Image (cartoon, rainbow, N blue to C red):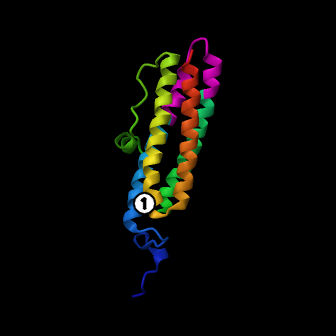
């Protein structure tokens, strides 16, 4: 029987990160993926349902934000796969993993939407920061790079949303 090489089985991945660290990082990235997807759905919901004097501004802003979030989920999921683990991809899995609540059943007023989204972006930034600690310890630069980009985007978006709430 031929000996299996590292390329033939996911259990024998050798990219310079231990299996334990890869599992921990993948778990953190799974939470980040769930948070990102949940925030995407909420933002898209608010784009559809926003009303009031700020309609045009918020409708356009929410579209920009949900498009950015949609484009973020694939690189996160693919990094999980590159580390050798399956990426979660169901509403049930995301519901268990996400630190974010689902969108309200009844669309709130525009100001409340902005508050919910600002807090959502802050939450996703915190999740990314928690995972970053694991990647830093494991010397996982590709994941660290992904996470710093995500933190930057979420922190800036939260700031911009909070600015809308000031009088």
- What residue lies at 39% left-to-right and 32% top-to-bottom? 101
Q: Position of residue 41 (x, y in %)?
A: 49, 33
| 167 or 81, nearer to the observer | 167
Secondary structure category for the residue under label 1: loop
- What residue lies at 39% left-to-right and 53% top-to-bottom? 27
Residue 88 visible from this viewpoint:
no
Residue at the left extreme?
A: 96
Q: Give left or right: position of 2 versus 48.
A: left
Q: Where does the N terminus fall, quadrant-wise? A: bottom left
Dominant secondary structure of the magenta stretch? helix
Q: Position of residue 58 (x, y in %)?
A: 60, 22
- What residue lies at 44% left-to-right and 61% top-to-bottom? 137
| Figure check: 92 above or below 110 | below
Residue 138 visible from this viewpoint:
yes
Residue at the top extreme?
A: 53
Q: How many marks?
A: 1
Quadrant position of residue 23: bottom left
Estimate how packed mark 1 is, as few (under 14), some (14 to 19) or many (20 or more) residues with alpha carbons within 10 Å.
Answer: some
| Figure check: 98 above or below 160 | below
| Figure check: 135 above or below 66 | below
| 158 or 93, nearer to the observer | 158
| Figure check: 53 above or below 159 | above
Q: Position of residue 155 (x, y in %)?
A: 54, 37
Q: Position of residue 51 (x, y in %)?
A: 56, 15
Over which residues does the magenta segment extend? 40-61
Q: Where does the C terminus fall, quadrant-wise? A: top right
Q: Which residue is mark 1?
A: 85
The answer to whether residue 53 is magenta is yes
Quadrant position of residue 164: top right
The answer to whether residue 164 is magenta is no
């Amino acid at each position: 029987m031929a000996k299996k090489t590292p390329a033939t089985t996911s259990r024998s991945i050798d990219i310079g990160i231990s299996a334990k660290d890869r599992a921990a990082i993948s778990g953190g990235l799974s939470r980040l993926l769930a948070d990102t997807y949940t925030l995407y759905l909420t933002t898209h919901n608010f784009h559809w349902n926003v009303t009031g004097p700020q309609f045009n501004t918020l409708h356009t802003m929410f579209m920009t934000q949900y498009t950015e979030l949609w484009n973020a989920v694939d690189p996160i999921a693919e990094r999980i796969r590159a580390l050798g683990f399956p990426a979660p991809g169901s509403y049930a899995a995301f519901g268990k993993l996400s630190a974010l609540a689902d969108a309200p059943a009844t669309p709130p007023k525009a100001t409340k939407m902005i508050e919910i989204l600002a807090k959502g972006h802050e939450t996703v930034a915190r999740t990314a920061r928690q995972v970053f600690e694991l990647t830093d310890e494991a010397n996982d630069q590709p994941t660290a790079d992904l996470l710093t980009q995500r933190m930057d985007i979420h922190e800036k978006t939260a700031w911009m949303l909070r600015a809308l709430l000031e009088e």
